[in-house]
Image (spheres, helix red, strand yellow):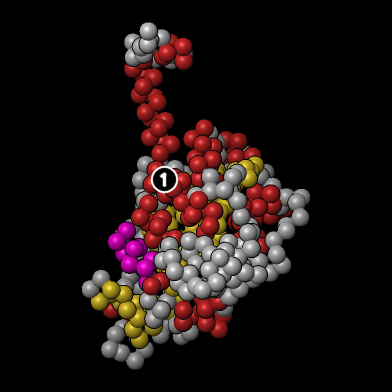
Amino acid sequence: MADTTPQAAAAPKLTIKDFQSDQDVRWCPGCGDYSILAQVQRVFPEFTHLKENYVAVSGIGCSSRFPYYMDIYGIHGIHGRAPAIASGVKLANPDLDVWVATGDGDGLSIGGNHMIHMLRRNINIKVLLFNNQIYGLTKGQYSPTSVLGQITKSTPHGVIDYPFVPVSLALGAGATLVARAMDRDPKHLQEVIRRAEQHHGSAFIEIYQNCNVFNDGAFFQFTEKDTRDDSVVYLEHGKPLVFGKEQEKGIRLNGFTPEAVSIKEGPYSISDLLVHNENDLTLAFILANMIHNPALPRAMGVFVSLDRPTYEEQLRDQVARAKSRKGNVTLQQVLDGDETWVIQ
């Protein structure tokens, strides 16, 4: 949410260079992380926050070097604990604009419990989840999003774990904005980052990110220009789900089951297609789980955007009510109060 303080209104106009740190970016050449970093640095100057109010928090993994490369305050935490650290930062100072950079391993494996509770509490924190379906930093073990049968360093005979669908996980956890984007579609990624910033509540963006060393091409069907049009449907609130090189195909619901149909040759027309509604949580689950049907395109964009009071707002109100009843008391007065006891 935009910083509306007088200081922010009078702040100097920021540029991309203001968010580029003096650290050498040391991801592997060709890594999709470069694009994600670049899009964030391009979009952040558009926001009205004071620069000193930005904070990036990460855990462990290739994605977690993100705070080093952003010239803002940052915390490189321990494995999987970025959501917990970010929650503490936001609750201690709600005026800060807090972003979490994490990976499919860091955020959904060791950090999975922290992630779901941060999202369900609706703390106003923005999550960028770099999903490359592999553990890149530790050299190619399978992750919670690796696909069935995938050969990795730790699954030489193929993955037998059923993978997470990160968007479905975030929806189920109760995140109030959930989206999906791709490293190789920079303009769309920028727009999704803007939507996350504008949202008041927990925002979760899954980003398809290519690891060209350990899982090269995992998302090329969706990211490359020669196949993208027939493999991706972009979600726009209030608009029908149309895709294809000539926008000749669409998605309709057969009961609760989505199916791809032609709107060029009939018998269906654009009026028969499913119209996206960002306020419909049930629809969001349906669209997220199209991933399980290879005959359907992969949905990109904002799946759901809901309005719900944030955790920090409710916490502030709760503290204010307690103070109004008991006044401003010291910790010692609380310890000496009638709700404590002494063990003899």
- Local SS, label 1: helix
Q: Is residue 275 above or below residue 84?
A: below
- Residue at 50%, 49% (x, y): give it: 111
Q: Hey, which quadrant is residue 28 in on the image? A: bottom right
Q: Which residues are magenta?
A: 281-290
- Which amino acid lies under the numbered mark 1 shown in the image of this protein? His
- Taking the magenta stretch, the answer to whether it contains residue 159 is no
In the image, 140 versus 210, the foreground residue is 140
- Residue at 40%, 57% (x, y): give it: 169
Quadrant where the image shows the C terminus: top left
Instruction: Identify the residue at the far bottom of this view.
Output: 265
Q: Is residue 263 above or below residue 211?
A: below
User: Would residue 323 be found to the left or right of residue 61 on screen?
Assistant: left
Instruction: Identify the residue at the far front of this view.
Output: 157
Q: Is residue 147 above or below residue 261?
A: above
- Observer able to see residue 54: no
Dominant SS type (magenta): helix
Percent across and percent down for residue 246 are: 46, 85
Label 1 CA crowd tier, 10 Å (few <14, some 14–19, many 20+): some
Count of labels shown?
1
Percent across and percent down for residue 181 are: 51, 65
Q: Hey, which quadrant is residue 118 in on the image? A: top left
Q: Is residue 278 above or below residue 199?
A: below
- Taking the magenta stretch, the answer to whether it contains residue 282 is yes
Provide the residue designation for mark 1: 117
- Residue at 68%, 55% (x, y): give it: 16
- Observer able to see residue 311: yes
Instruction: Identify the residue at the far top of this view.
Output: 344
Percent across and percent down for residue 307 are: 36, 49
Percent across and percent down for residue 331 are: 46, 15
User: Would residue 30 be found to the left or right of residue 166 on screen?
Assistant: right
